[in-house]
Amino acid sequence: MKLLRLSLTLAAAAVPLFASAQSDSLSDTNMNTAADLSNPLIQEWDTLHGIPPFALIKDDHFREAMEAGFELQRAEVKAIIENPGDPTFSNTIEALELSGALIERTFRIFGNLTGTDTNSNLDALELEMSPRNSQRKDEIYLNEDLFQRVSAVYEARDELDLDQEQHRLLELTYRDFVRAGAAVPVESRARLTELNAQLAVLSARFGQNLREETKVFEMVIVDGADLSGLPSDVIAAARETARKRGHNDAWVFGLDRSSFEAFMAHAESRQLRRQLFDAYRSRAAHENDTDNQKILLEMARLRAERARLLGFETHADYQLATRMAKSPDSAEKFLLQVWKPGLARAQEELRDMRELAVRDGIDELSPWDWWYYAERVREQKFTLDTDQLKPFFELSQVRDGAFYAANRLFGVSFQRLEDVPVWNPDVQAFEVRGPEDELIGIFMADYYARDSKSGGAWMNTYRNASDVGREIRPIVTNNLNLIKPPEGQPTLLSFDEVRTLFHEFGHGLQGLLTTVRYERFSGTSGLPRDYVELCSQVMEHWAQEPEMLQVYARDYRSGEVIPDDLIANIGAAATFNQGFMTTEYVAASLLDLAWHTMTVEEAENVDDARAFEVEVLNGYGLLPEIEPRYRSPYFSHIFAGGYSAGYYAYLWAEILDADAFTAFKDSGDIFNPELAGRFKTYIMEAGGREEPEILYRKFRGKDPDIQPLLRIRGLADKVDTG
Ligand SMILES: [Zn+2]
């Protein structure tokens, strides 16, 4: 059989991918149907920089491209196995790394679209295809003949003439096989495959249920008096939402995070705050078709069972084995190091708030009061209110601020591309170029919320970087969920939203700047969860530096630079409410570990998700006034995303980002060229080429220290209070 090699990087010709192949070899792969040639997903694209031709891609194209992709990779893998020559790095490890280009590309586009602009067709296809995709991987990793070839190359690794990156590719490929179960006894493999497929479906269903539950809820306000306390832009956005949803003379508040937080912090009506809060925290727990409680119980059980088959005591042990933290114990120990000072600080914050609440006739604060009274304390302490600050943070200026930081630190420039395909009219595309005008990649920003989009903020890619034979530069996306203002109005960000924009931009930069040879190591893909947040979180520090604010924080009406007293307030407010923020975050992280440090027997004994959650959190001493940042039924990071037994990772990575940024601060120059150069080389460009500990040490010249984290959060003085 003649193997058809896909090359997805071709720029110029708008020819079908298979046009150059002999027609008889097309028939070998059963793909010579007429439809193939009109399906844009199976073709090369003549779009600028190979950006997917979104307008041409119809929902129906995905199934066909997925089937073709499955088939093609099967043929590629078969060719590797049937290669008559002895297994070598090139004919086995590298060949495997390069296989599956069509299927990977198709799922990448599909995943991006279901996350940002989904519909019922795509949702149904996701449920159908996610188990097939998981089976595809099992077909590779549980293939005995293939594992034998991989093992043979691995055994001979010290005699092979491999460079550092090849060596790491070999080691990680071998490790992938072992972790996927290649060494599991044959009689258990069918069960393993079954578990993977079931978990893939449950996870997809979890995410869809949550999107649906978030979408359908609306709190309709008809009496203007109920809006009292809310900032004008929040009111305007609620008016617009009401209009779009067909409510006349009303205001509608939903459960997207921005709208929720704004309402909780400002609405004077305690009763409505409670109503919205209850709606938020009971999402996907209504014992209806979109309830996630049974799904997550099932997932916890199946994950425990899979871990046991793979030779681990629990799912967390399995997950953490390849992360920086190494074990659930060390992750928990670390969390508790921050949890205790966080709780002590939260108690102090509670005291400050009680004084104000008592004046309003409230003796006992409830979780739906925290945001509101924290905001009142903030105003009192820092004379800082949202309406006063927001005009300085207009979306395009904040984005340009992020571009400016990237330029000063890493020498890259961003140029808007007007006429390239986008998946939604709100998306903006940019060409990114380096100091020598060389192409770095494409950056696509999708900043607004919509019903067809998942909540939260994230970075993703349409294409990763690689350089095998031919250099391919990445196409990177950033997604936020900002409330879109009425036509003609500016988009004004809260400072939290500013930080989020810089955060995702940091991930984006790592995806863009990467210079690795193999896609496996490019940018953020494949990095350990507790390391991948370094590049994102470190950028948040620049967002609030006075030197940066003077550049990008300008009143959108007058161009006036943000005044010094507001800058000072932003700095002082950085440690404000950190007791609460630390506590709600660590509570969710501990909950995540609790779900995933159960043995099979333990997991089988849990039949009430809420009761389990309460018991765990009470056990750690969570205050009754604070909810965990996520209750389990909407904890999509761990049940629908890639963060299971890994939500702690953000705080873990904060050890690194706080320590890294401290290096810049201590040098007296936040754009210190020498440090920025090392950060670019060893962190941004290197991706996953080496172990994170090694790369970090190369950048910093030493191991990271936890003190900067505690200091920056304002918790350092609470460490010994228990
Ligand atoms: Zn992140």
Image: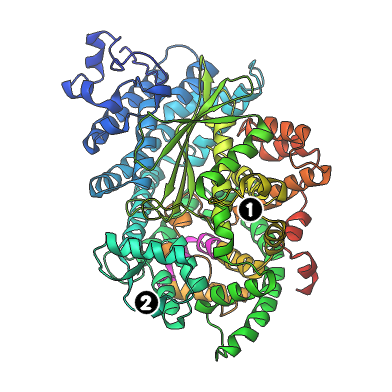
Q: Position of residue 501 (x, y in %)?
A: 54, 48
SS under mark 1: loop
Q: Which residues are magenta?
A: 591-609
Q: Main secondary structure of the magenta part?
A: helix
Residue drawn 28% across the image and 17% down it: 16
Decide if ligand 1 comes within 8 Å of the CB at mark 2.
no
Q: Position of residue 107 (x, y in %)?
A: 36, 36
Looking at the image, the residue that sits furthest to the left is: 34
| Mark closer to the observer (1, 2) | 2
Q: Split into 4 quadrants, where in the image is the N terminus?
A: top left
Residue drawn 44% across the image and 70% down it: 605
The residue labelled by disc 1 is 327
In the rendered structure, does residue 604 fall within the stretch colored magenta? yes
Q: Position of residue 495 (x, y in %)?
A: 58, 57
Q: CA distance from mark 1 to mark 2?
A: 53 Å
Residue 299's image quarter? bottom left
Residue drawn 42% across the image and 75% down it: 227
| Amino acid type shown at disc 2 | Gly
Residue drawn 29% across the image and 15% down it: 15
Q: Nearer the viewer, residue 530 or 132?
A: 530
Q: Is residue 398 visible?
A: yes
Question: Mark number for residue 224?
Answer: 2
Q: Nearer the viewer, residue 75 or 252?
A: 252
Q: Is residue 313 visible?
A: no
Which of disc 2 and disc 1 is earlier in sequence? 2
Q: Is residue 573 left or right of residue 301?
A: right
Q: Nearer the viewer, residue 172 or 359?
A: 359
In the rendered structure, does residue 51 fall within the stretch colored magenta? no
Q: Is residue 477 left or right of residue 555?
A: left
SS under mark 2: helix
